[in-house]
Image: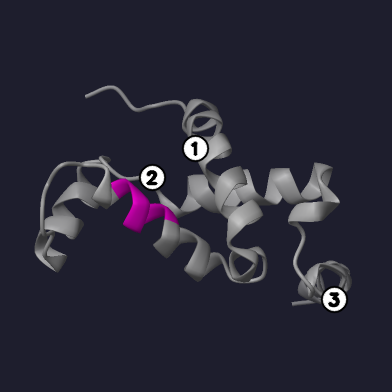
Amino acid sequence: MKMANPITKIKAIKDFVEDILLNYPQARDNDNYLCCVVWHKQVRASNQGDVTFENFLTMYSNSLLASSDSITRAARKLKETNPQFRGKHYEDRKQLEVQTRLTINKL
């Protein structure tokens, strides 16, 4: 089985994530919420009917749904280049990122 290129996966989900960040402001500050909205929309579009949790797990493990890594990477890139997609806590997280990098090097 050939492994898909991560860049290809991010490009494929980017427009989808952009639409969600635009229309669901809560997703701008909450990656878990963002992933859930993406998966919900993907499941609804899958023609699977009522999807049980077990079906969701099967779909996810068979790469029929976007990975959380691809979703959050696409969101980070969009936020980096488009300030309108940044949440209320974007600057706070950036400051914490700097502090974390300085501290983690001392561990």
Type of the residue with mark 2: Ala
Residue sitting at x 58%, y 46%? 19
**Mark 3 or mark 2: which comes first in sequence?**
2
What number is the disc on residue 66? 2
Q: Nearer the viewer, residue 76 or 27?
A: 27
Q: Could you say whether the residue bearing mark 2 is in a helix, strand or loop?
A: loop
Mark identifier at residue 101: none
Residue holding disc 1: 13
Question: Which secondary structure, mark 1?
Answer: helix
Tell whether 86 sits left or right of 8: right
User: Is residue 39 on the magenta stretch?
Assistant: yes
- Residue 32 lies in the magenta-colored region: no
The structure residue drawn at horizontal position 11% and vertical position 57%, both measured from the top left corner, is: 55
Front residue of this view, candidates 27 and 22? 22
Give the foreground label among 1 and 3: 1
Q: Position of residue 57 (x, y in %)?
A: 18, 58
Look at the picture and state if 59 lies above or below 104. above
Q: Report x, y in % for residue 25.
A: 65, 66
Q: Main secondary structure of the magenta part?
A: helix
> Which stretch is magenta?
38-42
Alpha carbon of mark 2 to alpha carbon of mark 1: how far?
7 Å
Query: Is 52 left, or right, of 97 in this rendering?
Result: left
Above or below, 24 relative to 95: above
Quadrant housing residue 101: bottom right
Mark linked to residue 92: 3
Residues tagged 2 and 1 counted as in contact (Cβ below 8 A): yes
